[in-house]
Amino acid sequence: MQHKIIDAKDVVIRFAGDSGDGMQLTGSLFADMSAVSGNELSTFPDYPAEIRAPHGTVSGVSGFQVHIGSEDVSTPGDYCDLLVAMNPAALKANARWCKRHAMILCDIDAFDASGLEKAGFATDNPFAELGVEDRMIIPAPITTLTLESLKNSGLDRKSALKCKNMFILGMACFIYNRRLDYVYGYIGRRFEKKHPEFIEPNKKVVRDGFNYAANMQLIPNTYIVEPAKNLKKGTYRNINGNQALAWGLLAAAEKSGLQLFCGSYPITPASGILEELAIHKSLGAKTLQAEDEIAGICTAIGAAFAGSLAVTSTSGPGLSLKTEAMGLAVMAELPLVIIDVQRGGPSTGLPTKTEQSDLNQALYGRNGECPMPVVAAHSPAHCFDAAFTAARIALEHMTPVILLSEGFLGNGSEPWHIPSMKDYPEIKPPFVQGLLKPGEKFHPFQRDPETLVRRWALPGQKGFEHRVGGLEKTHEGVLSNDPLNHETMVRERAEKVARIARDIPELKVSGPQDGKLLVVGWGGTYGHLHAAVHELGDNVSYAHFDFINPLPSNTGKVLESFGKILVCELNSGQFADYLRTLFPHCEIIKYNKIQGQPFLVGELVEAIRKEM
Amino acid sequence: MATLTFKDFKSDQEVRWCPGCGDRAVLSALQRALPKVSQALNYDKERYVVVSGIGCSSRLPYYMNTYGFHSIHGRATAVSTGIKVANPWLTVWQACGDGDALAIGGNHFIHAIRRNIDINIILFNNQIYGLTKGQYSPTSKFGAITKTSPYGTVEHPFNPGALVLGAKGTFFARSLDVELALNEEIMTAAALHDGCSVMEMLTNCIIFNDGAHRDLSDPAVKADHTIVLRQGERMIFGKDHDRGLIYDGRKMRVVHIGEGGFTEDDILVHDAHSDNIGIHMALADMKGPDFPVALGVIRDVRDITYDDGVRDQVKEVMSRSRIHCVDDLLRSGTTWEVE
């Protein structure tokens, strides 16, 4: 059969297998390869909490979806064009994500009686059972072929079986007309130091997979996704949210001239930030893997007192543990960035799934009157700017700042037009030297009359010895139970945070600037909302919030320009409730999803259309 | 550098501990020790940071005219750790109580010791919660009757010395609030020790646990109930200087010099610098009525410190990396051009 090469504007591929099958690697390699070829792309790893969940079961299925295109790609895609299913469980967990015309490529060796039984199929026709028998099903004996390919390689059976994902990658490269050079290069780099003996076998499996796909006569069409044409000129790289966030912090350290200190405790899905910073000691970053979440933030508070750009990173349950110390940082008025990569909650919840449900905790979850700025990242690459901005606010306004990311952003990746650091502002903390008039005595909690920011004196500086702590104090830094002093300080701490609104950009609305309906989102739903609004023809008004507290200063004006406001978020309506409290005269309605999964563009389109 | 005195370390804040509180004596010893430390190490006053948690003793930073951080309950050790790692040039002192360091802050305490971070921890052990008005603590004696144990506790206390040495601590000393001269000596030794120094100060809470350490502090009996260990000296104690400690290979024993064939030469010589943590553990574990309680510097050994390790690793990686600024970082690894 002669196959036809079809030009595709965009395609979505979902790699799914057992959690030990290497699907995350296969997916990210395919994504990187597409990025280097100049495609727009977005990825979505969807994996179980267990490292090795029971083999062959639906709960153990690990998936990686990648959306590549030659035009604007802002989401990992709702439904896929190609589903790779390494076993019946992977098929069962993912069949519902297949488009009507999708191709399903499966390792038929795994579809034996035992495999079908483990996945909970009642019959021996899983495709019919799932209602996908009309899709283009390509059964390939991938296990057998991989073992055959490697029979003279010297690899034992166990090692050889680990190469199945490379066979699949070879097949995918054929289907999407990808050259194998990138994969060869990766394999070389990966194994050259420790296991050079794996290089040739892995290359061979990829090549055999590619050739098998070409020769099997079952694949009628292959696809070419042209490089994106409307991309801004410049240098690009692929980046995930956790990495971008870590790099944004390093950028803020450089622009403030401070050393970066990160005290953190490992937690899914935030560990990547600590891991990434630990690599970059060459930029002077100090990382401390603390004994617990509380020590993570408390070491960071100590480092802030000593004059570092201090950071602690965590996810929801960890944020709960840090709560008391966050209050200490508010009271001591020290700069600190607290990163929460949100996951499904409450409690341990859904550790590997995404959600936006820590918003209330970020805004209110502390004892006493304890206001704290809250900033949210809206895409994997935007994590860089969000981290930079959070650090800038913390350092220039002498306050802890909560930076909200999401599992979907932390693990997701996209191509990024690499910025130049000369385009980023210098960060200027209010260091006491230079701010003190000759003969003026230093008082630790005396404030700048405009910003209400206190001045920062660092241990080691002669003549500025002072004490900070959790107890209420006067401007002079003396302990005080005086009722009026407490009220003054509470109001000043709140007003200091409120005035940060003068230091952040105004809220922008895309589409008509007034009208019947405004669609509102915040955080990681940006890509999906952007795509949904685009699909509706760009006459829909849409505003996305990167700044949650304080809100941009024109927020009231924007909301009042619309008849009703539809707030879409991945929780039961926390941001909508927040806006209702602040703008009670606006008609604010909610569209929510609480499934540990991102929105689908399709469901957003429908929800918005209903309100139009 | 001007010579610092006692007065330089006194802040203008009124000391608000109860009259007769043992914490006052410890504060005074610290204010007397630091000028000596400054002289010995050529430290200026701005180099000192005093950190605390929550509890009576944690008020101490307010009374010191240095940089200070009065943090939250149990977390002083974590705050100290952050300060020291961020700026190893600073010299960090920490005041914490038995509830603060061993109950709510127990985790940070053992991990600071495990990491051997160069901070000086004064553990005020009065065997009671004072600031919350009289509940039992993790060092209260078994059976102690307190507000939350009206029928006596049914739990064993920690021996802080055993805990520190169990975590492979490199410095442990013990003393009593009233031993002003010994305390100055211990604090100076702790300051000179490069690593995590824990000084257990047995303090008297005059309100809620008065006399808890009377057995050790009463001049009539203290010579028989305590032994002050000094480097290189034989472990001899007693009013009449007639008893000593020997180690028979398995356990510590008290012998009478001149009886049973034991002479002064048989008595152990104290070596705080010895690698043998077993002897130090046995010394830290001693208690009445069979043994004297060991005071003084029990263990003082060298090991790599965490703060030096972090700093040196950063230096080392910086010297061999090709990434020197964020622009280098952004362009490292796989990138591609769009033209």
Image (tube, rainbow, N blue to C red):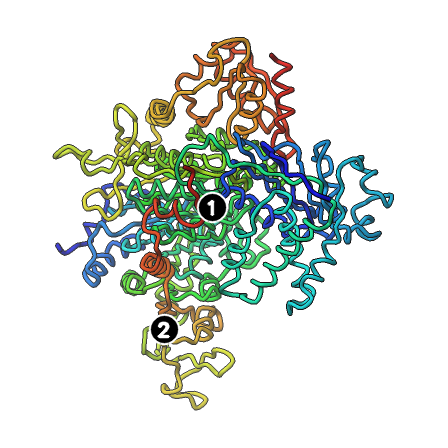
Q: Mark 2 lies on which chain?
A: B
Mark 2 packing: few (<14 Cα in 10 Å), some, or many (20+)? many
Q: What residue type is labelled 1?
A: Ile
Q: Residue furthest bottom?
A: B261
Which image quarter is the N terminus of chain A in? top right
Q: Is residue B315 left or right of residue B225?
A: left
Does the CB distance between marks 2 and 1 fall below 8 Å? no
Residue at 74% x, 47% y is A217
Residue at 38% x, 71% y is B227
Q: Let me know if residue B164 appears in the view.
A: yes
For the image shown, how many numbered marks are present on the structure? 2
Q: Mark 1 points at which residue?
A: A273
Residue B166, label in figure? none
Q: Is residue A187 left or right of residue A498?
A: right
Which image quarter is the C terminus of chain A in? top right
Under circle 1, the secondary element is: helix
Q: Mark 2 points at which residue?
A: B272
Q: How far apart are marks 2 and 1 (CA)?
A: 42 Å
Q: Mark 1 lies on which chain?
A: A
Q: Is residue B186 above or below residue B91?
A: below
Q: Let me know if residue B18 appears in the view.
A: no
Choose between B320 and A154: the one closer to the eye. Answer: A154
Question: Horizontal and vertical percent for residue A375?
Answer: 44, 31
Q: In this view, does B61 lie to the left or right of A410?
A: left
Q: Which amino acid does label 2 sit on?
A: Ala
Choose between B141 and B108: the one closer to the eye. Answer: B108
Question: Horizontal and vertical percent for residue A506?
Answer: 39, 20
Asked which quadrant contains residue A45, the reply is top right
